[in-house]
Amino acid sequence: MKLKKSKGKLKIFLGYAAGSGKTYTMLEAAHEAKKHNTDVVAGYIEPHDRPDTRRQAEGLETIPPLVVEYKGVKLREFDLDRALERKPQLILVDELAHTNAPGCRNEKRYQDVKELLRAGIDVYTTINIQHLESLNDLVGSITHIEVRERIPDSVFDHADQVEVIDIEPEDLLARMKEGKIYKPVQAERAMNNFFKREKLAALREITLRRTADRVNRIAEEERNITGDMDYHTGEHILACISAAESSAKVIRSAARLAYAFRGQFTGLYVETPAMQEANEKTKQGVRRNMELARALGAKIVTVYGSDIGSQVAEYAMVSNVSKVVLGRTNHRFFMRKPMAEVLEKLNSMAPNIDVYIIPDMKNRKAAGKYGHREGRRKAENAGMQALWEFGLINIILVLTTIAAWILQKFHLPESNIIMVYILGVLLSSYISDKKIYAVYSSLFSVLAFNFLFTEPYFSLKAYDKGYPTTFAMLFIVGLFTASQTRKLKLQNKESVKKAYRTEILLENSQKLRRCKSEKEVWQQAAAQVEKLLDLSLVIYPVNKDGLLGEAILFPRQGTEKTSLEPLLTSQEKAVAKWVAANHHRAGACTHTLSTAKAMYLPVQDEENVKGVMGIFLEERRQIQEFKYGLLIAMLNETGVKLKDYF
């Protein structure tokens, strides 16, 4: 009896530029495998107008492409479902970094390839070095071209075999001139830009070096497994994640360091109160950078606090971080740079940690983006909010002055008047977190006290020699108390958030322990998730054979079960089946089967999926990172509890 193959093997044909011969060599290898009675199918071959490649593809069984219509244009894509149904021993899938058209199951072709491998099918595929995520910035600095189609380095590093298709730059340029790669007009344009000899030589060097690094790492890991060496570097690389455009470069640089040092890689995001109130575009930037860090193999950690420098330094010390990677920005706040504050805290609290500063070359260009309509709209909204706060603060200061005038009429000491103004400064700081308003309210209090309540009245002069000291102390005390009020306000927000996180996880754990049956576990999990997200849910229990059970609907409070009928279609259930089979999330707001109505998440223990939870995202808005982290923790705990009933 033939044993079932558990996982397919991946072979990547790697080049440093288009036309190097990747697809041709892959087809050659396929014909060689066919000679040895291997069941080979061409799943998708990129239709380049290259006669040699077309001839080489002849004689291979080919899966017809999936035709997807997008914006009136018919696009040819790899038909994953037909390939899984055909299930050959070996399949060829060209252009691993390709982005699929909207409507395909997966957003990226490398995700299609992962499904093929999980189904036990061997895959041959092709890629150029510029499509590796961690090298994107490095290659961009050479070619001055932003490559948008990229794959995580883990796909490349975990491939079973990588074959470098090496060709001398001179030979590649000769092929270009002969018209074997592009047509004459396109070839001339390419040779004036990307296909310059010095650029090709640099890309070739990066390709060979990256492949050599991969081989060395595999060899060291093998020696470690066999006991020939005690393999451990102790390096822990920390990348600081933010919403800035430069953060992507920081993450990629940290990933290259982690790979080079064979060290642990962590992405740290400090969520401040200001970020909680940021606009959706900023929050999307943070989520995008977090996803990038995950794709590059980082463990994502989120901490909460208003002092970014202290949070980074404390985490670095507690987690034995050896190297911290920061981004350099041009943003100033009260003439101080946030990066300088982080450096100062790291130097004082963790002087033994190496710090790497990655320059922000795009920041100046990004500053011009406010000229766009969306930027102007957000700037106008921010201006209106600032104007409202400024007006409210002025009202408080005027009321404070009236109260001080009443106290003077009752011949109360000047110290009482000063206390009234300090109270006004405190109230102003409560209304707005901006430091400039604290300075303004303190200065206003000093000038109003001098002008209205010291002799000579209605003048900024002061006869008493002690008044200058009084004014200075009033300003300093007012500014200090305002600053402390602002800090207490921010810390209170963070304390509430941490308390909420602790409370909801503790409550979930306690209630799950009291559950006596699988049905009660699902009901309790749904109740806690609905409380957290205020969204309707559908749950598919998974039996011991890995098959989905009947859907259990949990409409959110105030809605009827009939509102969840869109989640009961065959298409939605197919997404849930995919999640159960692949142990990965899918559906709305993800990169897999993104046209679904709900986001589907696996509820699993260390090994098996116990069920699938669908979260109905009616407005198709991303779940906040803070809540998503809580959600995953709750589902993991539910999965562990469900082990008792399997």
Image (cartoon, grey):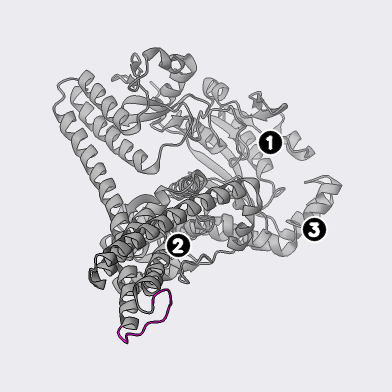
Marks 2,3: beta carbons within 8 A: no
The answer to whether residue 264 of the structure is visible from this angle is no
Q: Secondary structure at mark 3?
A: loop
| Residue 57 showing in the rendered view | yes
Residue that label 2 marks: 257
- For marks 2 and 1 on the same chain, the one whose residue lies earlier in the sequence: 1
Alpha carbon of mark 3 to alpha carbon of mark 1: how far?
25 Å
Tell me which residue sits at (13%, 27%) in the image: 514
Q: Amino acid at mark 1?
A: Glu
Crowding at mark 3 (Cα within 10 Å: few <14, some 14-19, many 20+): few
Q: Secondary structure at mark 2?
A: helix
Q: Where is residue 90, by image quadrant?
A: top right
Q: Which residue is mark 1?
A: 46
Q: Is residue 40 left or right of residue 454?
A: right
- Above or below, 3 against 397 in this view is above
Q: Quadrant of the C terminus?
A: top left
Location of residue 496 in the rendering, given as x and y in whole percent from the top left corner = 26, 47
- The residue most toward the right is 184
Identify which residue is drawn at 22% across, 43% down: 502
Q: Nearer the viewer, mark 3 or mark 1?
A: 3
Q: Residue at x 53, y 53 (%)?
A: 383
Pair 2/1: label in front: 2
- Magenta-tinted stretch: 457-466
> Which residue carries the number 3 mark?
192
